[in-house]
Image (tube, helix red, strand yellow):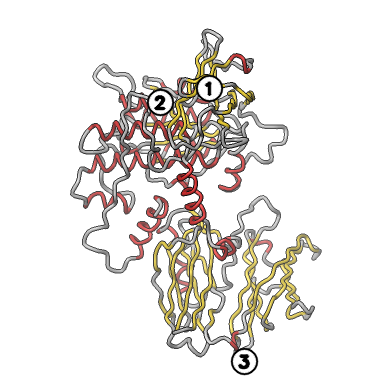
């Protein structure tokens, strides 16, 4: 199970379990890497979780991002291929390609794409060479509660408000943030507000923030060592995540006083350090570290954090006024060279290859990754196999396609349609409209027709919904959004498959979703006065999701009905409690706050002997 899935499952079970065990389930410590720190990595095997390098233009092409800074701290932008001396494992390499990239963070004339609308939009923006990507990692486990936290918040507030350009992507996280919950933004005010809420929790164990922390309190081991392992694992996951969204340079500002002890001996910590440095270099990620304690003769800065920064092309900041110093992080990312060469080594030998980049011009400082792992042929085959295994099944992909997250479009609502057997056994279709703006509720009409052109319904939605009889098969829906004059302002076509309930021994009616945002709305739903179904698929963590459905057919009375929560790849996270309502249908009551942000699928299944059926419902947690 991935770290994201583990966090989601733990959070869900903590809320939903009817009879929790006497002790929470143990949380396995993250793996500790095994390599010496001070030397360049000589090992032949990459550390666990390391992403192989990307070879552009062929399997033997290696790309390196190089930053060259003059004595004044300004980027040098007028170098040519002949100015570079590149060596791989000590062997000179011929520079084939060289491109100067200017990433100033300034907005283009058309700045309509600046606001980040969704994680998918952020990923598209991050992939561009001229977009800078920054992650601020707040290591709350290793930041003092008082002066260090206050000093760090002051420095970061100034940093996020004044150092970045309009197009820069910035994310703020801590060690309990799953990698797929990292959210990039260009909203500097929102970042500053989030910074103000950060806390230092060094030595503070209660109240626990999550099921993971609750489990730590029951472990018969050193809690500080467990915390160090959580931080180390989160940093590794963040580096690997950044490597998946952008090949070019990425930057992490790691705010911490120390990593802490990762194992019974200091050697374990040293081995981890070497592994994470390799991981950062392989994923083209520069790490800067900020010790919020400042300068004090009685305080020794962490050698681990200093080595982590210096060996990934960054710096360690440890002074009493760090706000100004942090600006160098952005400045050093404003211009860099994309340098490519064709390796003389075998790129599929499974070994680590050292890269040394020098510039023939005197008086400059060169920053580049120190090497890469070349995956072996066996590793590449294994990676392809794992990628294929991790790919979501077609049915999951189809279910997830129902999630719409496009706030930039003019349509201000969602349309849902579902089918269930009517009193005469003929399919009864219900269409519901949930407006994002209540002013649009009365301005929606729907036309429903079969492939033959037969029209089953054509008219406005009364109070946001309408029901009508239809024939089994494909049902075509045309939704018209009307303006105040009654003219069509927007039109959208969609289709649904209407089951033949009369001929199926076992079938599931289309599940109906309700959203409760307040206790009053929840009581209204539970009392049977729910109103129209909720047509959307986007939920906030403060919402409560109620799902109702029924099972029909000759085998329905004795059927076994289950509901399983799946992640976006189709992996099973947890079996959900299921109950029967007074009116008869089955009901799922899911507090959205019990699971992590992300995309999910509810797999609803019914079986009786050889008769089996299932349906999928997707939703997103913002």
Q: Secondary structure at mark 2?
A: helix
Which dot marks residue 309? Answer: 2
Residue 464 in the image: x percent, y percent?
64, 71
Q: Are marks 1 and 3 in contact (CB under 8 Å)?
A: no
* Residue visible at 61% across and 78% down in the picture: 419
Locate residue 615, reporting x and y percent.
53, 72
Q: Which mark is residue 377?
A: none
Label tally: 3
Q: Nearer the viewer, mark 3 or mark 2?
A: 2
Answer above or below: position of 231 versus 392: above
Dot 2 or dot 1, earlier in sequence: 2
Earlier in the chain: of badge 1 and badge 3, it is 1
Residue ID for mark 1: 332
| Above or below, 48 relative to 366 | below
Q: Residue furthest top?
A: 362
Residue at image point 52% right, 84% down: 506
| Residue 577 vs residue 504, the one in the foreground | 504
Inter-mark Cα distance, 1 to 3: 72 Å
x, y (%) of residue 103? 61, 27
Judged from the image, the secondary structure of the residue bearing numbered disc 3 is loop
Q: Secondary structure at mark 1?
A: loop
Mark seen at residue 424: 3
| Other residues around mark 1 within 10 Å, as few (<14) / some (14–19) / many (≥20) | some
Apparent side of residue 84 relative to residue 302 in the rendered image (left or right): right
For the residues labelled 2 and 1, the Cα–Cα distance comes to 14 Å
Quarter holding the N terminus is: bottom left
Up the image or down, 26 lies above or below 549; here it is above
Q: Residue at x 71, y 54 (%)?
A: 410
Q: Nearer the viewer, residue 140 or 436?
A: 140
Mark 3 neighbour class, 10 Å CA radius: few under 14, some 14 to 19, many 20 or more: few
Residue 199, given in percent of the width and then of the height, sits at 35, 38
**562, 113: nearer the viewer:** 562
């Amino acid at each position: 199970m991935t770290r994201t899935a583990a966090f989601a499952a733990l959070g869900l079970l903590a809320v939903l379990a009817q009879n929790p065990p006497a002790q929470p389930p143990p949380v396995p410590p993250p793996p500790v890497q095994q390599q010496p720190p001070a030397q360049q990595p000589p090992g032949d095997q990459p550390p666990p979780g390391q992403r192989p390098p990307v070879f552009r233009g062929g399997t033997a092409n290696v790309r390196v991002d190089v930053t060259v800074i003059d004595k004044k701290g300004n980027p040098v932008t007028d170098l040519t291929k002949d100015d570079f001396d590149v060596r791989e494992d000590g062997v000179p390499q011929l520079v084939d390609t060289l491109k100067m990239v200017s990433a100033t963070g300034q907005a283009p004339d058309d700045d309509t794409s600046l606001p980040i609308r969704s994680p998918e939009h952020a990923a598209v923006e991050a992939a561009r060479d001229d977009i800078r990507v920054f992650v601020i990692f707040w290591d709350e486990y290793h930041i003092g509660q008082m002066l260090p936290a206050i000093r760090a918040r002051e420095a970061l507030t100034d940093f996020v408000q004044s150092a970045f350009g309009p197009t820069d992507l910035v994310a703020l996280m801590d060690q309990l943030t799953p990698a797929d919950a990292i959210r990039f933004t260009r909203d500097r005010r929102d970042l500053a507000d989030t910074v103000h809420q950060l806390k230092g929790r060094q030595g503070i164990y209660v109240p626990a923030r999550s099921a993971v922390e609750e489990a730590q309190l029951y472990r018969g081991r050193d809690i500080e060592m467990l915390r160090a392992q959580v931080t180390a694992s989160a940093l590794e996951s963040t580096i690997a995540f950044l490597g998946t969204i952008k090949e070019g340079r990425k930057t992490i500002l790691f705010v911490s006083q120390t990593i802490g002890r990762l194992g019974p001996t200091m050697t374990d910590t040293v081995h981890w350090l070497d592994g994470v440095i390799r991981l950062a270099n392989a994923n083209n990620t520069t790490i800067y570290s900020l010790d919020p304690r400042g300068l004090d003769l009685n305080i020794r800065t962490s050698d681990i954090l200093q080595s982590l920064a210096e060996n990934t092309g960054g710096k360690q900041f440890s002074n009493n006024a760090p706000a100004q110093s942090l600006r160098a992080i952005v400045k050093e990312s404003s211009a860099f060279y994309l340098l490519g060469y064709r390796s003389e080594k075998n790129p599929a030998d499974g070994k680590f290859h050292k890269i040394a980049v020098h510039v023939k011009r005197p008086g400059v400082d060169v920053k580049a990754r120190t090497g890469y792992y070349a995956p072996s042929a066996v590793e590449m085959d294994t990676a392809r196999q794992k990628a294929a295994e991790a790919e979501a099944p077609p049915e999951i992909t189809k279910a997830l396609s129902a999630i719409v997250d496009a706030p930039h479009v003019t349509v201000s609502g969602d349309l849902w349609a579902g089918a269930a057997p009517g009193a005469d056994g003929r399919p009864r279709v219900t269409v519901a409209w949930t407006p994002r703006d209540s002013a649009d509720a009365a301005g929606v009409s729907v036309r429903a027709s079969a492939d033959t052109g037969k029209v089953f319904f054509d008219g406005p939605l009364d109070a946001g919904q309408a029901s009508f009889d239809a024939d089994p098969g494909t049902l075509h829906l045309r939704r018209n959004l009307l303006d105040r004059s009654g003219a069509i302002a927007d039109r959208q076509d969609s289709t649904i498959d209407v089951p033949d309930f009369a001929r199926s021994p076992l079938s599931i009616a289309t599940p109906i979703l309700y959203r409760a945002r307040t206790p009053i709305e929840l009581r209204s739903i539970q009392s049977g006065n729910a109103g129209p179904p909720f047509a959307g698929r986007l939920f906030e963590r403060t919402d409560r999701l109620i799902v109702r459905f029924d099972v029909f057919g000759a085998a329905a009375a004795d059927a076994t009905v289950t509901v399983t929560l799946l992640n976006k790849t189709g992996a099973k996270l947890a079996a959900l409690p299921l109950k029967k309502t007074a009116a008869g249908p089955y009901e799922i009551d899911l507090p959205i706050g019990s699971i992590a942000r992300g995309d999910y699928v509810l797999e609803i299944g019914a079986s009786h002997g050889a008769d089996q059926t299932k349906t999928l419902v997707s939703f997103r947690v913002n």
